[in-house]
Amino acid sequence: MAAIVEEDRRRYRPLENVLNAINKDFIQLSKTEVIRNNAILRELLSLLTGKMQKVDNLFKEMFSTVFYGGSFYDGLRVGTPDEFDLDLLLTLPKLVEPELILCNIPGYLQLKLNNYPALQKDKSMANRYKDLRKLLEDEKDYYLDNQKVRQWMERVVTLALNDFQKENGKYVLDVSMGRFLAKIHKAGPAFTLKVTGQVKGEKISLDIDLVPCFLFGKDKWPKSQFRPNPVASKVKPKYVTYCESQPPKRYYPKKRSNIYYYKKLKKTDFFIVPKPVKDAPGRSNRYWRLSFQQQERIIIDNKNYLKPTIKFLKKMRDVSDHTCIASYYIKTLVLWETEKMCDAFWSSSISYVFMTILKKYYECLRDKRIPYYWYKTNNLIQGVNDITMQNMQNRIKYIINDIESHLQDDPSVVIKYLLTKDEKTQYYEPSPSRYLATDEDDRGLRTEQIVGISVGIGILAIGAVGLWRALSNSDNRRN
């Protein structure tokens, strides 16, 4: 693994305070909002999944647990904690002998129920899973149809919501923090539950994406050119809490009597997602995308400045309007670097980590390649046209050169590449919080500022003591 280049670490040190201030004031999520919104989300989800199991027997039979996915629970969310990706994990009965069949689209596969006829012959199982046939592409080949699964999930959620009262055309969901109103928003394949309400006079808006996924264990881990599970045997127990299907305990509300606790996932578990494929050959509804979110979360966890660096790159992408670079591409780039960099690198300094990964990002754009971490022959950015790629490459190269040429005289030059116009105005406004110590993710980044303030206070104190003594001596002479 690559060792720390001490010369570079020292050279980028002038960026330290600036990056720390940007991280604290414009990137880190509000802890109060995070805890509050998580508590609301858990109760809402508890109400909804409970109703879903009552209104649809097939969902009740197949529903296993919930995986709290996406950038928010990965610790990579930039902005406000109001968008959530929730994977409703389903399982199939072993009797049908589900088989994951690799196909010619990297990262995708097909799901076939090899022994579906056996299910139909078993009266008990046939009754429990009688609606499963509605999710098949046809009753000849027994392939699971991703479009039919998405439509079925939408119907189940709608039926569940119809069991709640309505107010102004929206569904009423009462939780311990108050009353919330929900409506379904459909845009293409995406299925979002939009929730609004108030807590202590503050308006709350939550967008919750509900995705039906099928859960599989280590016996179904894809072979061929796919990467073996890198965390199955060596992960430490402390990671397990973070990659469970439920959020960390600090997100629970104090009153938990009506919270449904979901089953834990194993480190070897993965799932498939009904994400449509553009221009897929043949029967496009057969394709399912593999998801190794749990393993990715373990890999990027417990690496001090890794997550802030990803968030910096996402901010730079947004400010530069590089819309063709998905957040997952940036995350993938960093996943590859975890294999190359030693553990000490991620805890060296935020400026050194950021600039090192920024240069790696430039190299990927220059080479027109970000390999999919789990199937390296799949290039995630192969669909970006050459002109756009060249423009992005030139832009990132310019940013790197501009930052490096101003390290000593003006390290704050990085601000214009990470903040919007309004954010830059806020940054230059006086802020007492900018001189306070940060949370553990940003520890040690404002030492120089804190020392400077301490010295200033000390000088003022010495001056005050001197003035007091002078006044005392003057009074004594008068007496």
Image (cartoon, grey):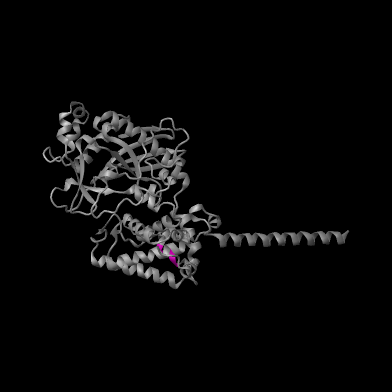
User: Which stretch is magenta?
Assistant: 413-417
264 vs 232, nearest the viewer = 232
Residue 167 appearing in the image: no
Identify the image quadrant of the C terminus: bottom right
Q: Residue furthest left?
A: 140
Give above or below for 413 relative to 161.
Answer: below
Return the x and y of residue 129 as percentages of the image width and height. 21, 31
| Magenta stretch: dominant secondary structure | helix
- 427 in magenta: no
Residue at the limit of the structure toward the front, as seen here: 233
Q: Is residue 232 visible?
A: yes
- Image quadrant where one finds the N terminus: bottom left
- Residue 352 horizontal/vertical position (percent): 45, 64
Against 247, residue 361 (above or below) is below
| Residue 438 shown left or right of residue 211 in the figure | right
Up/down of 184 relative to 21, above or below:
above
Can you tell which quarter of the image residue 58 is in? top left
Residue 8 rendering spot, x and y as whole percentages: 46, 69
Q: Residue at x 30, y 40 (%)?
A: 88
Numbered circles on residues, count: 0
Question: Residue 126 location in percent, x, y?
Answer: 18, 29
Residue 364 against residue 92 in the figure, above or below:
below
Q: 282 or 177, which lies in front?
A: 282
- Give the quarter of the image for residue 68: top left
Image quarter for residue 341?
bottom left
